[in-house]
Amino acid sequence: MRNIVFFGNSLTAGYGLSPQQAFPALIQQKIDSAGLAWQCINAGVSGETTAGGLQRLPSVLSKRRPDVFVLELGANDGLRGIPVRETTQNLQRIVEEVHRKYPDTQIVLVGMEFPFDLGPFGNHQFARYAQEFKALFRQVADKNRLPFVPFLLQGVLGRPELNLPDRAHPNAAGYRIVAENVWQVLEPVLRSTEQVQAD
């Protein structure tokens, strides 16, 4: 049985819902239905920033060897206005540390966009931050040649019927869409990894 470690924040942990409703559990259902031999491990911690993830990473890597590592961090950096360069550096260091410890692990990077429409503020500084924040994920993915989920909350953000009352976290229906967003990128990775190991 191969391991997929989902390393993220509340969006991975499934804030406000049962673990079975979070997207890693829904991915497990898709894996089982497809007859693939993978185990999903939800290593999401609510409120975590990229800096916190970097500190927590060694303990996560010491518990389970990830064959695939799904990296979903950065949203809390954006909410706190952490400089884009710092977020980028932290994500890069996480990627490097995973590959240093497990060179054969395939990393999938999950992109995020600033979770609020900054237009009404009329502040160009905010708008520029939002653009740079969105772009940093693809830059890290391209630099490291990682499979990339462009936007985790595609089709969910801004739709009240798919989110909890806080409008920041998906509800059960929203997570079904989130899981599909991730699965579109993750499934080919899993199948190609199985093929390589079979050969």
Image (spheres, helix red, strand yellow):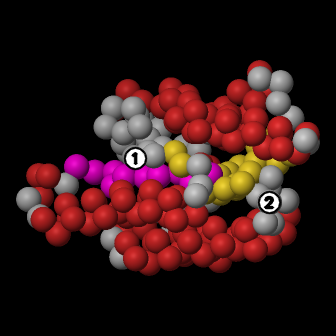
Instruction: Read off the residue under disc 1.
Output: 168
Apparent side of residue 35 relative to residue 111 in the rendered image (left or right) = right
- Where, by quadrant of the figure, is residue 31 drawn? top right
Q: Which mark is residue 104?
A: 2
Q: Residues within 10 Å of mark 1 (few under 14, many from 20)?
A: some
Asked if the magenta segment contains residue 88, the reply would be no
x and y percent of residue 76 in the render? Answer: 44, 63
- Where, by quadrant of the figure, is residue 72 drawn? bottom right
Task: Name the residue located 83 percent from the left edge and 39 percent from the top edge.
Answer: 194
Task: Name the residue located 88 percent from the left edge and 45 percent from the top edge.
Answer: 197
Query: In the rendered view of the protein, which quadrant contains the C terminus?
Result: top right
Helix, strand or loop at mark 2: loop
* Residue 183 in sight from this viewpoint: yes
Direction left: furthest residue: 122
The segment highlighted magenta reads: 108-117
x and y percent of residue 94 in the render? Answer: 63, 70
Query: In the rendered view of the protein, which quadrant contains the N terminus?
Result: top right
Task: Name the residue located 52 percent from the left edge and 45 percent from the top edge.
Answer: 149
Give the distance between the C-alpha atoms of the residues marked 2 and 1, in whole angstroms: 35 Å
Apparent side of residue 119 relative to residue 69 in the rendered image (left or right) = left
* Residue 47 in sight from this viewpoint: no
Q: Residues within 10 Å of mark 2 (few under 14, many from 20)?
A: few
